[in-house]
């Protein structure tokens, strides 16, 4: 039996997005049409619209629909803004569908190669490199990561322009916190918690080991 991905997308929005207080209709509309399954290997595409964080490469996963929709809504992306997506391929497709000028940075190697084909013909600038390196062509109005980090790197925060927003899950234990970083007109960056979230921690962003004596 072949899975009807179009129907699965509609069900995802109705049962995982709208029911979790995501009322931004631009986010909803984009998620109804973006082919999330295109980012997964064929053997895992049946998991694309489940309440899961399915891996597209070892150590790298798509953020589950509920969480990515809530994070996008918190960022409040709007058409014409410049967006940087950091190991966030699904968010990149959604933001592009919403009319933003999107750059996707993926770590070099298997993770980049796993999703590269999904961006063929898409108006998304695709680059592979160190996720912690300074962001080129910045600053940006919107930044987002689908993987958790212990703490948002300074390079990501530095890439937030005046009035810009960074959405990221910071996680040091079993449960992480989705946090929104905002740069005000005075240049100062504020941070606030948005919701609990437990996506896998990105490789290279794990907590430093603590040794007790």
Image (cartoon, rainbow, N blue to C red):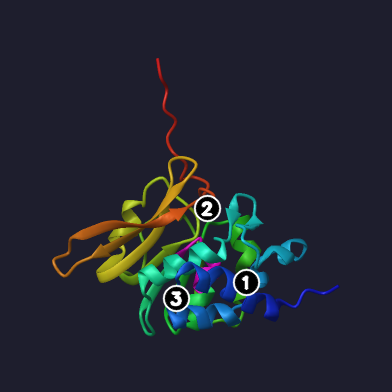
Residue lying at the far top in this picture: please name it. 213
Q: Quadrant of the N terminus?
A: bottom right
- Asked if residue 99 lies left or right of residue 52, the reply is left
For the residues labelled 2 and 3, the Cα–Cα distance comes to 22 Å
- The magenta-colored residue range is 85-92
Residue 91 is a magenta residue: yes
Which sits earlier in the primary sequence, circle 1 or circle 3?
Answer: 1
Contact between marks 1 and 3 (CB within 8 A): the answer is no
x and y percentages locating residue 47 in the rendered image: 69, 63
Can residue 108 be spotted in the picture? yes
Contact between marks 2 and 3 (CB within 8 A): the answer is no
Reading the image, the residue beneath label 3 is 102
- Asked if residue 160 lies left or right of residue 176, the reply is left
Of discs 2 and 3, which sits in the foreground? 2
- Asked if residue 133 lies left or right of residue 88, the reply is left
Reading the image, the residue beneath label 1 is 36
x and y percentages locating residue 17 in the rendered image: 52, 71
């Amino acid at each position: 039996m072949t899975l009807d991905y179009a129907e699965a997308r509609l069900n995802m929005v109705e049962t995982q997005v709208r029911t979790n207080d995501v009322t931004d209709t631009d986010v909803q509309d984009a998620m109804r049409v973006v082919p999330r399954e295109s980012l997964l290997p064929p053997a895992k595409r049946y998991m694309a619209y489940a309440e899961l964080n399915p891996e597209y490469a070892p150590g790298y996963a798509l953020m589950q629909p509920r969480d990515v929709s809530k994070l996008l809504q918190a960022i409040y992306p709007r058409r014409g803004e410049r967006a940087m997506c950091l190991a966030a391929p699904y968010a990149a497709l959604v933001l592009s569908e919403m009319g933003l000028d999107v750059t996707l940075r993926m770590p070099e190697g298997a993770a980049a190669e796993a999703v590269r084909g999904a961006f063929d013909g898409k108006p998304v600038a695709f680059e592979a490199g160190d996720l912690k390196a300074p962001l080129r062509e910045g600053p940006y109005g919107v930044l987002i990561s689908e993987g958790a980090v212990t703490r948002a790197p300074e390079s990501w925060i530095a890439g937030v322009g005046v009035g810009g927003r960074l959405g990221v899950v910071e996680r040091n234990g079993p449960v992480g916190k989705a946090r929104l970083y905002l740069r005000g007109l005075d240049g100062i960056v504020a941070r606030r918690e948005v919701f609990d979230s437990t996506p896998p921690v990105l490789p290279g962003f794990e907590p430093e080991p603590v040794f007790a004596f």
